[in-house]
Image (cartoon, grey):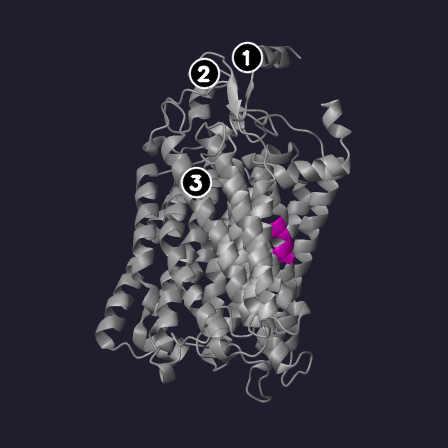
């Protein structure tokens, strides 16, 4: 242990650049996602400051378009997704009793593709303007937008999306193939179930986005006309491709958050999750229905009454499995021995908040009413009640709940509660009033509004709430820093929890489990505790453990695609730029070839070393 504390910065950096350990990749996702969360938050504060009063001139109309585009894109793709992947990486293999994910090399590749894609998305800020066509990039606005901003959006999301798709496939295979003996599907913790369904959604949803971005890349960079009606194309096809991905994406984000709340509420109510099988069924049903409702984003496009009615009914049907979940969480707490700490506060705050988001969702699902709500601030309010009230609350709950497992220290409870109240009050101040602004006629995506329209007070309140959320986030960052420096070490199970990840030391050893655990029911650790044991019953004798080697190739591959992206973007000005495509693809394909031809058999941790370690 002393040796690890004295490692140089260079060796730690190299370790993280080459790691294939899912726990370290989780930390990489946490840091990168947290960084982009702050960037997206600053963009949001700039938007709100522009709208604090009528006819404000804080930013220009063009820059405002860049802000709203990059805020939405950053928060969805570069903050929420990677932070969810951080917890999936940190927790899922531990919850199912696995030593690692199924494909450690691909796990690393997924992260570096995401990171380089995220950097590319933001390069536009420094080269004359970021993407400015809205986060949904509707054609023909996106196909005719001048400059390279939208090109960076297209190439950045292609690279980043490939990383997400790789991650999703990896978790599907891990959960299907790597469960410990006795860990049947109906004994898996709810967080693992939600990660499983979200990964299945990624598998089917992301290809639609990839196809759409591919067509847009050809329209913008090579002069094709897939979305140009003058050339026989169709602009509305982009909306279909985007929302066939975009609606399941909401559930890719919110289902793992539901899983986090299920773990937290069960642990701190000291009760089994009420209606476990109904919760699993509801999770799968939400995933299934999520694919059947994408066109509710397009009620005003002119699809006709039949299509609008079908999608309206399908959309309202999603309220049923979601309602099952809400009631099951409430019934889990009913009669429980509830402990209120920061993670539980976020969970309690989530239930009424998300319920409001669900109610406005049913309102927006009524096609005739949607003609009034569409493109107004009512939709902005609804969307943020679902995404912030569901996903961000879940991420904050997960951060406080699993921080001791990931880092061996508990975040400061007092600071945690300060964060919660600042953010929670600020959130409702910001977005609740926006429902009424929307009903009063305030359109979304406009950078100014006129005086004497009754919109001044609501916007001022909304902006003040946004700054409270900003202060809450700063308190959380301070909490993380102060805990890292001064926090006290905790044991393997500080919460007296129920699932497998709490059966091993905090932070976990790099091989996770010395011996794979024997799972004898739902909440396996709790079962062992009730029978008087302190740890899990092993399912195998102590033996050698096979581990994968670190590799620099995932980083190199991702760097290659990143370099090639610039070649694709700038070749329209000068054919010389194509040399970057050849250099970048050469690096990427060379790395793939190296990976294919080189036998990387990993290494073994010997049984004797494990015995010696146990004695120390």
Element carrying mark 2: loop
* C-alpha distance separating marks 2 and 1: 15 Å
Q: Quadrant of residue 272?
A: top left
Q: Which residue is mark 1?
A: 607
Position of residue 481 relative to residue 521, above or below, is below
* C-alpha distance separating marks 2 and 3: 24 Å
Whether residue 153 appears in this view of the structure is yes
Would you call the spot at circle 3 few (<14 residues within 10 Å), some (14-19), or many (20 or more)? Answer: many
Q: Is residue 474 left or right of residue 564?
A: right
Q: Which residue is mark 3?
A: 171
Would you call the spot at circle 2 few (<14 residues within 10 Å), some (14-19), or many (20 or more)? Answer: some
Residue at 58% in and 41% down:
553
Q: Is residue 323 magenta?
A: no
Element carrying mark 1: helix
* C-alpha distance separating marks 1 and 3: 28 Å
Nearer the observer, 75 or 467? 75
Nearer the observer, 340 or 531? 531
Q: Quadrant of the N terminus?
A: top right
* Position of residue 592 measured from the top left corner of the image (x, y, whole percent): 51, 43
Q: Earlier in the sequence, mark 2 or mark 3?
A: 3
Whether residue 114 appears in this view of the structure is no
Q: Which residue is mark 2?
A: 538
* Position of residue 564 measured from the top left corner of the image (x, y, whole percent): 56, 59
Residue numbers of the magenta segment: 32-38
Which of discs 2 and 3 lies nearer the camera? The answer is: 3
């Amino acid at each position: 242990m002393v040796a690890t504390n004295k490692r140089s910065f260079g060796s730690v950096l190299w370790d993280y650049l080459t790691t294939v350990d899912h726990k370290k990749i989780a930390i990489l996702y946490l840091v990168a996602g947290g960084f982009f969360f702050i960037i997206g938050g600053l963009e949001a504060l700039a938007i709100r400051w522009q709208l604090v009063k009528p006819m404000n001139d804080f930013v220009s109309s063009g820059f405002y378009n860049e802000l709203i585009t990059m805020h939405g894109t950053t928060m969805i793709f570069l903050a929420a997704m990677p932070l969810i992947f951080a917890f999936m990486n940190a927790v899922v293999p531990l919850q199912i009793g696995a030593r690692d994910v199924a494909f450690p090399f691909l796990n690393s590749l997924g992260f570096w593709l995401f990171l380089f894609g995220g950097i590319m998305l933001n390069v536009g800020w420094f080269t004359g303007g970021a993407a400015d066509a809205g986060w949904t990039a509707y054609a023909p606005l996106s196909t005719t937008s001048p400059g390279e901003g939208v090109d960076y959006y297209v190439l950045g999301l292609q690279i980043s999306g490939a990383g997400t798709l790789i991650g999703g496939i990896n978790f599907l295979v891990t959960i299907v193939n790597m469960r410990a003996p006795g860990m049947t599907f109906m004994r898996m913790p709810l967080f693992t179930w939600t990660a499983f369904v979200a990964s299945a959604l990624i598998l089917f949803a992301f290809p639609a986005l990839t196809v759409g971005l591919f067509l847009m890349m050809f329209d913008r960079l090579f002069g094709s006309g897939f979305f140009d009606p003058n050339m026989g194309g169709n602009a509305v096809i982009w909306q279909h491709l985007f929302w066939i991905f975009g609606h399941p994406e909401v559930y890719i984000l919110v289902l793992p958050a539901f899983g986090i709340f299920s773990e937290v509420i069960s642990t701190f109510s000291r009760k089994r999750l009420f209606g476990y099988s109904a919760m699993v069924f509801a999770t799968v049903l939400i995933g299934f229905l999520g694919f059947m409702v994408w066109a509710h984003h397009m009620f005003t496009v002119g699809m006709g009454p039949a299509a609008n009615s079908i999608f309206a009914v399908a959309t309202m049907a999603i309220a049923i499995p979601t309602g099952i979940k809400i009631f099951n969480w409430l019934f889990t707490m009913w009669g429980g021995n509830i402990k209120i700490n920061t993670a539980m506060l976020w969970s309690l705050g989530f239930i009424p908040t998300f319920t409001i988001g669900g109610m406005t969702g049913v309102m927006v699902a009524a096609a005739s009413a949607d003609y009034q709500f569409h493109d107004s601030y009512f939709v902005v309010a609804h969307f943020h009640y679902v995404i912030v009230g569901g996903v961000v609350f879940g991420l904050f709950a997960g951060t406080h709940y699993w921080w001791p497992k990931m880092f061996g220290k508990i975040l400061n409870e007092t600071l945690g509660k300060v964060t919660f109240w600042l953010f929670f009050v600020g959130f409702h101040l910001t977005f609740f009033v926006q429902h009424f602004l929307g009903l009063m006629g305030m359109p979304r995506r406009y950078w100014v509004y006129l005086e004497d329209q009754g919109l001044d007070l609501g916007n001022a309140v909304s902006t003040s709430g946004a700054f409270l959320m900003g202060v809450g986030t700063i308190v959380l960052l301070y909490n993380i820093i102060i805990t890292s420096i001064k926090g006290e070490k905790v044991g393997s199970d500080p919460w007296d929890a129920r699932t497998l990840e709490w059966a091993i030391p905090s932070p976990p050893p790099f091989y996770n489990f010395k011996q794979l655990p024997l799972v004898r029911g739902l909440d396996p650790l709790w079962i062992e505790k009730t029978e008087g044991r302190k740890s899990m019953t092993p399912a195998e004798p102590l033996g050698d453990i096979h581990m994968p080697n670190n590799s620099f190739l995932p980083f190199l591959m991702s760097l290659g695609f990143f370099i090639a992206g610039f070649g694709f973007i700038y070749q329209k000005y000068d054919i010389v730029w194509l040399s970057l495509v050849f250099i970048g693809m050469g690096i990427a394909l060379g790395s793939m070839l190296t990976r294919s031809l080189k036998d990387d058999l990993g290494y073994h941790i010997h049984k004797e070393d494990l015995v010696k370690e146990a004695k120390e």
